[in-house]
Amino acid sequence: MGAQQEKKPSEERKHKSTQNNTQTSQVQWGRAWEVDWFSLASVLFLLMFAPLIVYYFIMSCDQYQCSLMNPLIDLLTGNKHLSDIWNKTPMLTYKAAGIYALWVTFQVVLYICLPDFCHKFLPRYVGGVQEGAVTPAGIVNKYEINGLQAWIFTHVLWFANAYYFHYFSPTIIFDNWIPLMWCANILGYAVSTFAMIKGYFFPTNPKDCKFTGNFFYDYMMGIEFNPRIGKWFDFKLFFNGRPGIVAWTLINLSYAAKQQELYGQVTNSMILVNVLQGIYVLDFFWNEAWYLKTIDICHDHFGWYLGWGDCVWLPYLYTLQGLYLVYHPVQLGTANAIGILILGFIGYYIFRMTNHQKDLFRRTNGNCKIWGKKPEYIECSYMSVEGTKYYSKLMTSGFWGWARHFNYTGDLMGSLAYCLACGFEYILPYFYIVYMTILLTHRCIRDEHRCLSKYGRDWKRYTAAVPYRLLPGVF
Ligand code: NDP
């Protein structure tokens, strides 16, 4: 564990007596308790427009060959009315509802009924029961880490059914893509609404709930920190990882199968997107235990942002490159393909090594080697809501000495590689890099605001030692 609880009662008393001075910052550890107008405006904007954005992108591919401009031009020139576009949009079907219900039920079963066995035979894989980070109320949750197993199971079944038993076509996801989108929206809204009601009436850990008093903010950013049903069904871990991320690679495979069906071949760009995103997804499941220590699980409350985002935004917008390539089967020149592959690998290497360095550092409490040397760090302390003092360390060497979020830089390089694989004819595939840049820059600021509230002066010492966020010397 990165944080060590200080057990000496005299120390605790000392810190309780000084707590009044720091009350504001302690209370803010987690999320802002007072909602400023900018946050509220952003929340309202996203609640209103995020579902429309997803619809617009997917509809543009379905009706306009992935052109983002042509629907607008048609509407502005009066060539088409909104009702024309809507009438051409496939509606919810029983078939899609059946597929989706089966899919989610299957993932729930894999998640709660199959304890992990992969860690028993895969060297260096960490699975089975693992602990999360200390919550603001001082609780340490336990998780059953079995995502890799669920991913393998699902993919083996997919290949067997699609290519051996022929129970369904491998293009099934593409063929039902818009009807499935309605199902994903229904689940996304249902789970976010349920999470809100649960937060009010039967929260799992009441001390970790946060009510700002603003209905929209609470609905979007969540009330409960770690909502659960029973001992093991953790909403955040389930919805973050499955059904969305397990589906990611299946969706890409379905796009590749559609290319094969339409054009008799799978282009090298489609293979690149499948391979690079496949590595990213596998990395996520291989490192699921590490994921328990990331911002999503450690700091975010569970609301619409995670619930709807994981059900709809992620599977529909993170897979736009593959969808685009179904409509535009780009065949890259060898040099370009190799260049993109190298960019993707370097980005992945930086992303993984930076995350690994922090994980190793925190797991060993600094007793490890980073780039062959003992890591350098800044000692820091913080208090839980109840006034218990904890100690932690912020590393200032390795990639963490280059910039405060170099893992994001690697992620952005990988994201750019997926987009470049689609060529330069249309802007739709570049949505991902634009979105990731906004997401991760905003995340830097959000995380640093939280860390400043948590560590106070120690955080300032850290930012003085590592002055840049993403790019050394630039930002
Ligand atoms: P980090 O893994 O960088 O975690 C940030 C936390 O790490 C901080 O809040 C702090 O937590 C701790 N920390 C910060 N600096 C240091 C340091 N110098 N030494 C030790 N600990 C430190 O961020 P995320 O959870 O946001 O991201 C994890 C990965 O997931 C990233 O690689 C990111 O690119 C990726 N990601 C991908 C997304 C996607 O949609 N594809 C979305 C979001 C993230 P503490 O309170 O414990 O000190």
Image: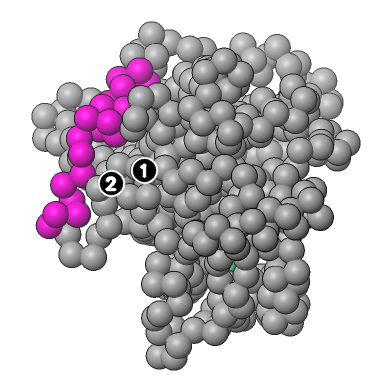
- The percent position of residue 266, horizontal first and vertical second, equals 34, 50
Say if mark 2 contacts mark 1, CB within 8 Å. Answer: yes
Spatial CA distance of label 2 from label 1 is 6 Å
Query: Residue visible at 19% across and 54% down?
Result: 119
* Residue 110 covered by magenta stretch: yes
* Ligand 1 - quadrant of the structure image: bottom right
Residue underneath mark 1:
142
Q: Is residue 244 visible?
A: no
Q: Residue furthest right?
A: 37
The answer to whether 454 appears left or right of 158 in the picture is right
Residue underneath mark 2:
129
**Which class describes the residues within 10 Å of circle 1: few (<14), some (14-19), or many (20+)?**
some
Closer to the camera, 35 or 250?
35
Principal secondary structure, stretch drawn in magenta: helix
Q: Which residues are magenta?
A: 100-121
Q: What secondary structure is marked by label 2?
A: strand
Quarter of the image containing the C terminus?
Answer: bottom right
* Residue 338 covered by magenta stretch: no
Q: Which mark is residue 188?
A: none
* Amino acid on which the number 1 mark rests in the picture: Lys
